[in-house]
Image (tube, rainbow, N blue to C red):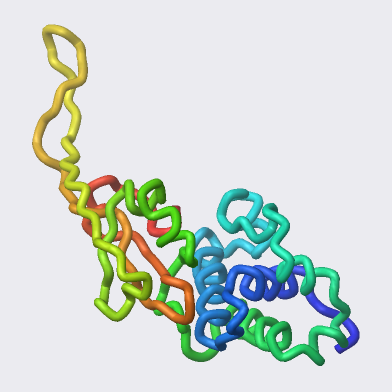
């Protein structure tokens, strides 16, 4: 392994850095696939293009994550000799090629232990979330509903101001879990949220 594609190595480092130190295949693989899934859905972007479009997508790149740094600085030979890093590289290769099973079950996002430790202030808790399966509740936290109704807007002929018209849609929560492995929960957007807002699944 004398040469390694830049995007594949970056994805491997993200999966390795964001996963727990348990080095579980499904956890590392799920993160790799979640990144690759979102990149594919977002116009077929590369990993680097995805990170440029959403700089806050993964904090492993910017928060001094030692595992991310270790893999990024490692030679291909060193990666191949390390069980965890080799596992991450293997999953990154599969995820970019979209080959084999996807441990994230179609996710685009994930959360680790901060979902529990920062529960009260966590963005997904503030948006509202639901577990797709009770088994995904690995941190034993309470689901949160945040009911929202979206209206079509029309312009009042007399005042020329926009006012609510008919209901466009409503939703109870924004995020729905798709899987959980190790210390990581995987997420997509709730379909009702996308329908009501006209949002994109990958944004």
Q: Which residue is at 85% across, 76% downward? A: 74
Q: Look at the picture and state if 104 lies above or below 48.
A: below
Quarter of the figure with residue 51? bottom right
In which quadrant will I find the N terminus? bottom right
Left or right relative to 47: residue 37: left
Given residues 180 and 91, the one toward you in this image is 180
Q: Which residue is at 79% across, 75% downward? A: 5
Q: Which residue is at 17% across, 25% downward? A: 154
Q: Look at the picture and state if 83 lies above or below 49.
A: below
Residue 150 x/y as whole percent:
19, 40
Left or right relative to 197: residue 169: left
Q: From this viewpoint, which residue is outermost toward the left? A: 166
Q: Which residue is at 55% across, 68% downward? A: 35
Q: Look at the picture and state if 149 lies above or below 86.
A: above
Q: From this viewpoint, which residue is outermost toward the front? A: 117
Quarter of the figure with residue 96? bottom right
Quarter of the figure with residue 178? bottom left
Residue 45 x/y as whole percent:
60, 61
Residue 176 x/y as whole percent:
30, 65
Given residues 52 and 132, the one toward you in this image is 132
Left or right relative to 108: residue 76: right
Residue 26 x/y as whole percent:
51, 86
């Amino acid at each position: 392994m004398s040469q390694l594609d830049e995007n594949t190595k970056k994805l491997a480092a993200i999966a390795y850095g964001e996963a727990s130190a348990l080095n579980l295949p499904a956890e590392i693989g799920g993160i790799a696939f979640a990144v690759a899934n979102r990149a594919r859905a977002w116009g077929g972007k590369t990993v680097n293009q995805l990170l440029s479009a959403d700089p806050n997508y993964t904090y492993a790149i910017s928060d001094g994550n030692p595992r991310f740094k270790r893999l990024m600085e490692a030679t291909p030979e060193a990666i191949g000799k390390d069980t965890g890093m080799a596992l991450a590289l293997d999953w990154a290769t599969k995820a970019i090629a979209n080959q084999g099973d996807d441990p994230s079950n179609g996710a685009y996002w994930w959360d680790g232990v901060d979902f529990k430790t920062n529960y009260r202030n966590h963005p997904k808790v503030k948006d509202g979330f639901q577990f797709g399966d009770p088994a995904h509740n690995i941190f034993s936290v309470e689901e949160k509903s945040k009911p929202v109704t979206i209206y079509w807007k029309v312009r009042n002929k007399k005042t020329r101001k926009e006012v609510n018209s008919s209901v466009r849609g409503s939703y109870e929560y924004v995020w729905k879990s798709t899987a959980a492995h190790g210390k990581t929960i995987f997420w997509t957007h709730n379909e009702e949220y996308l329908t009501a807002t006209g949002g994109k699944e990958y944004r």
